[in-house]
Amino acid sequence: MGEFDTKIKVLKNELSSLESRMETLFKKFCEEVAEFLTSWYEAQARDEVKRKSDVTIKIGKDQLAVLKQKISDLQKKVKDVVSDFLGKDSIWWHKSHGKQQYSYHGNRPPDIVEKALRLAAGLLAPILEDFGYFSKDGPEPLLWREWDSTGKYQLQSGRPYYPYGLEWSPQMKNFMREYDEAHIRCQEILAEISRLEKEKREKQSEDLWDSL
């Protein structure tokens, strides 16, 4: 049985090392997301201010300054935002050992992470709504609200959610691809451990039979 135990031990050590690496990648990814969102909140708000110039002119310089301050306040708490939305154990395999997938489909990032990122981005929506850039009573708020289980946009009960594709930074993409590679290797290791443990049990049973 020693040979089986030795192989299993080596694989478990590799698995532990990979999970430690995944924790490091998770932390680096979250740091990069915080930087990404800090810039994104500012850029997106600027686009809305420019696109809806009639609203901008109507609210005037003083209210625009208040809007900028609220966006600045959101930027200051971005690390907490990232922790709230992307720090959930259920998103990350090394924390929960679920059935998560992290592979890219063309340029489309993994859904489980992208959804959390869009929820974090969506926190800009209530600020813009308060200043009239989105109408709370018209159809446009639906564009910045989470879908329901049927695939339709929720009304005001839905969480703020940025519904369009986000262009991840190169570093975010790199960290996620590395995480995906580590995740794939972990699955291979777990399958190999399961195979070896099965063979070990079979050998033990065979030896027990032969000993009688």
Image (cartoon, rainbow, N blue to C red):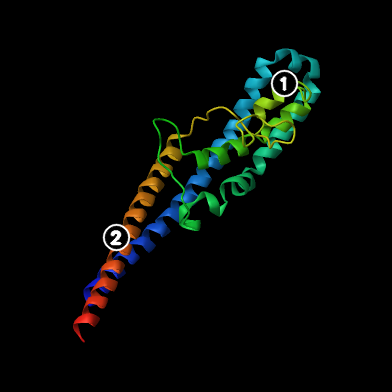
Residue at 29% from the left image edge and 63% from the top image edge: 195
Q: Residue at 36%, 54% (x, y): give it.
A: 187
N-term mark: 1 or 2: 1
Where residue 64 sits, quadrant-wise, is: top right
Q: Residue furthest left?
A: 210
Which residue type carries mark 1? Answer: Pro
Along the horizontal axis of the image, is 18 left or right of 122? left
Q: Which disc is residue 93 wearing?
A: none
Q: CA distance from mark 1 to mark 2?
A: 53 Å
Q: Percent x, y for residue 83? A: 60, 49
The amino acid type found where label 2 is placed reads Glu
User: In the displayed structure, would residue 59 be above or below residue 187?
Assistant: above
Picture coordinates of residue 86 (x, y %)?
56, 46
Q: Which residue is mark 2?
A: 192
Quarter in which the C terminus is drawn: bottom left
Specify few, some or many for label 1: CA neighbours under 10 Å numbering under 14, 14-19, or 20 or more. Answer: few
Provide the secondary structure element on which disc 1 rests: loop
Residue 35, position in %: x, y? Answer: 55, 39
In the rendered view, does 44 fall on the left or right side of 178? right
At a point 62% along the width and 21% down the height, the residue shown is: 47
**Element type where label 2 sits in the image:** helix
Q: Mark 2, residues whose alpha carbon is within 10 Å: few (<14), some, or many (≥20)?
A: some
Establish if 192 lies above or below 40: below
Return the residue at label 1.
Answer: 139
Q: Is residue 76 left or right of residue 166?
A: right
Q: Decide: is 69 above or below 22.
A: above
- Closest to the observer: 198 or 56? 198
